[in-house]
Amino acid sequence: PARATEARKVLKFSFWSAPPRGGRRSRPTAMSSVGARLAALLITATAFAAAPPATCPPDDFDSTDNFDLDTYISKPWYVQQQMEVSYLPASQNRNVRAQYARKQGWSLFRYDLSVYNHAEDLAEPHNSRDAKLCAKVVDALTGKLKVAPCFLPPFLAGPYWVVAYDESEGYALVS
């Protein structure tokens, strides 16, 4: 990716001809512009093809172990630091918390947990943004869940991994 960026920077300037004596730039001919763009595309494609494929998560990355799901969901979790995401922009990053509970009774998609997320606008009057979600336990001992709006089936749910957790210290790192 870095090589592709450098290639684009170099070729970006080749789309224009050298300035004449008066200092104004003139457009290159259509043929040279197309040729430069094709060269840029070829160099970019080659750079991406040469880069090793990225995997997410990386092969040596995993979630926590000896996880106690019942203790984890026994009380609300308050966010201390949150990455801005499409469903929770920075402007709604106030008093963000999540409460989990085991689902009682029948569930269409057989989700295991109910998830109640709460956030507020930073600007006054701090309007609430609440969401009711569902979670499927993938692996309780390693803190792996799949979370989605309850109307979606679990195969469309997104991964929720507890990467680090210490009940006595009162923190959890979730990805």
Image (tube, helix red, strand yellow):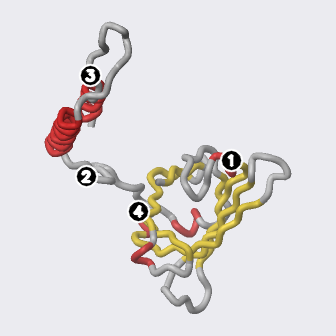
User: Quick one: label 1, few (<14), some, or many (20+) residues within 10 Å?
Assistant: few
What amino acid is labelled 2 in the image? Asp
Question: Mark 4 and 3 residues: CB-CB less than 8 Å, in contact?
Answer: no
| Secondary structure category for the residue under label 4 | helix
- Which of marks 1 and 2 precedes in the sequence? 2
**Residue topped by disc 3:** 17
Check residue 91 in the rendering and tell me which mark sits there, or answer none. 1
Q: Quadrant of residue 48?
A: top left
Check residue 142 in the rendering and tell me which mark sits there, or answer none. 4
What amino acid is labelled 4 in the image? Thr
Q: Position of residue 115 (x, y in %)?
A: 61, 70
Kindly report the distance in space between the C-alpha atoms of the residues bearing marks 4 and 3.
59 Å
Residue found 32% across the figure and 50% down from its top = 61
Residue 129 against residue 156 in the figure, above or below: above
Q: Position of residue 103 (x, y in %)?
A: 59, 81
- Which of marks 4 and 2 precedes in the sequence? 2
Question: Mark 4 and 1 residues: CB-CB less than 8 Å, in contact?
Answer: no
What amino acid is labelled 3 in the image? Ser
User: Quick one: label 2, few (<14), some, or many (20+) residues within 10 Å?
Assistant: few
Question: Mark 2 and 4 residues: CB-CB less than 8 Å, in contact?
Answer: no
Q: Which image quarter is the N terminus in? A: top left
Q: Position of residue 66 (x, y in %)?
A: 43, 60
Check residue 59 in the rendering and tell me which mark sits there, or answer none. 2
User: Quick one: label 4, few (<14), some, or many (20+) residues within 10 Å?
Assistant: some
Kindly report the distance in space between the C-alpha atoms of the residues bearing marks 4 and 1.
33 Å
Kindly report the distance in space between the C-alpha atoms of the residues bearing marks 3 and 1.
45 Å
Q: Position of residue 79 (x, y in %)?
A: 63, 50
Kindly report the distance in space between the C-alpha atoms of the residues bearing marks 2 and 1.
34 Å
User: Quick one: label 3, few (<14), some, or many (20+) residues within 10 Å?
Assistant: some
